[in-house]
Each structure stands twice: as structure tokens, then as C-alpha cells.
Image (cartoon, helix red, strand yellow):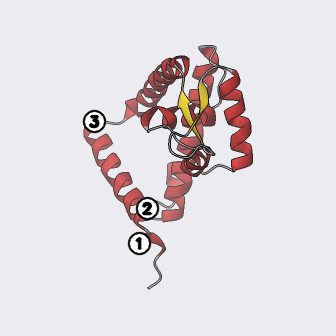
């Protein structure tokens, strides 16, 4: 890509660049999972990742966290359950509700794939000095906090 042709001060161009980098990262992680004979796509992995870092979640909570359609999430959960990575368990407080929790096999796979993600990310950022990584991380974290706080959408 010709870097000189891209206006460096365009916020939209920054968002496009971040999106393209994410797409390349997702593709590289999926390739690594395929190479390791892990039959997951990136969204299925992210579901496992989220379920492993929180208390057991409801399907609705997981759909919100993934920004995913609840109907499509049901199919995703069915596949993960069929493969033995998660189970649906009754909620201790509300018997009508279900919670999602990882099985031992799901926890093990989650840990392995996080390692693949770390390795891919290291390869991606190997061209960037540690100090520059820190600055980039700080800047992106600042933008994310601004967006999540709702201030980015406030009308003056």
C-alpha cells in the first residue's frame, strides 16, 4: 500500500486502517487455528474467550458482548456444545434461565487459542518498537474509553 497516498489526518482513514488491521489479524488467527487443526472460526473463539473470563453468562449477555444476533448465536452455541466446549446449565436463581459455562475441554482449547493469538499479534507488531507499542496502546485505549463513555456521540 502506498502510505503517501493516504491522508494522515483523516479520522475516517484511521478507522479504516484499524478495521483492515483487525481483518488481517482475524484471518491470520483463523489460518493458525486451521494449521493447528482447531475447528473454530474467530467468532466462536471470541465466545469461548468471553465465557472463560466472566462468571457464567446467559446467551443474551453473550450476544450483547459479541454484538451478535441472538438467533445466529444459538447456532454458534449449538456448534460449541456439540464439540464439547461448553454446556448450558440452569441458572441457580432463575430456573427459567440458562447460563453458559466452559467445559474442561473448552477451557483447555481457549488457553491454546489465546496462545495462537498472542503469537500472531507478536508477529504483526514485530516491526514496532516497544515504546511505540505503548504509545499506540495508550492512544487506542483513550479513544475506546471516549467512545464507550458516550462522549463521542454527544451533540454540541
Residues at marks 3 and 2, CA–CA distance in whole angstroms: 27 Å
Label 2 CA crowd tier, 10 Å (few <14, some 14–19, many 20+):
few
Question: Answer yes or no: do the residues labelled 1 and 3 have beta carbons within 8 Å?
Answer: no
- Residue ID for mark 3: 130
Which residue corresponds to the image point at 38% horizontal and 29% vertical from the top-left?
126
Q: Secondary structure at mark 3?
A: helix
Q: Quadrant of the N terminus?
A: top right
Question: For the residues marked 1 and 3, what is the alpha-carbon distance in whole angstroms?
Answer: 30 Å
Left or right of 135? Residue 86 is right
Question: Residue at 51% across / 49% down in the picture?
Answer: 18
Q: Position of residue 52 (x, y in %)?
A: 47, 31
Residue corresponding to mark 2:
148
Q: Is residue 122 toward the left or the right of residue 44 in the image?
A: left
Residue 30: horizontal and vertical position, in percent?
61, 27
| Residue 110 sits above or below residue 151 on the image | above
Q: Which residue is mark 1?
A: 151
Answer yes or no: is residue 6 visible.
no
* Residue 124: image location, x then y, percent: 46, 32
Amino acid at each position: 500500500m502506498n502510505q503517501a497516498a493516504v491522508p494522515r489526518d483523516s479520522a475516517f482513514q484511521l478507522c479504516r486502517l484499524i478495521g483492515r488491521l483487525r481483518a488481517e489479524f482475524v484471518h491470520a488467527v483463523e489460518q493458525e487455528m486451521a494449521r493447528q487443526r482447531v475447528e473454530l472460526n474467530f467468532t466462536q473463539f471470541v465466545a469461548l474467550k468471553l465465557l472463560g473470563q466472566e462468571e457464567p453468562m446467559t446467551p443474551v449477555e453473550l450476544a450483547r458482548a459479541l454484538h451478535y444476533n441472538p438467533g445466529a448465536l444459538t447456532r454458534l452455541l449449538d456448534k460449541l456444545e456439540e464439540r464439547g466446549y461448553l454446556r448450558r446449565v440452569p441458572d441457580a436463581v432463575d430456573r427459567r434461565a440458562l447460563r453458559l459455562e466452559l467445559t474442561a475441554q473448552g477451557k483447555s482449547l481457549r488457553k491454546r487459542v489465546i496462545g495462537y493469538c498472542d503469537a500472531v499479534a507478536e508477529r504483526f507488531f514485530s516491526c514496532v518498537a516497544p515504546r511505540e507499542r505503548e504509545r499506540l496502546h495508550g492512544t487506542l485505549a483513550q479513544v475506546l474509553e471516549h467512545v464507550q463513555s458516550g462522549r463521542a456521540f454527544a451533540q454540541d
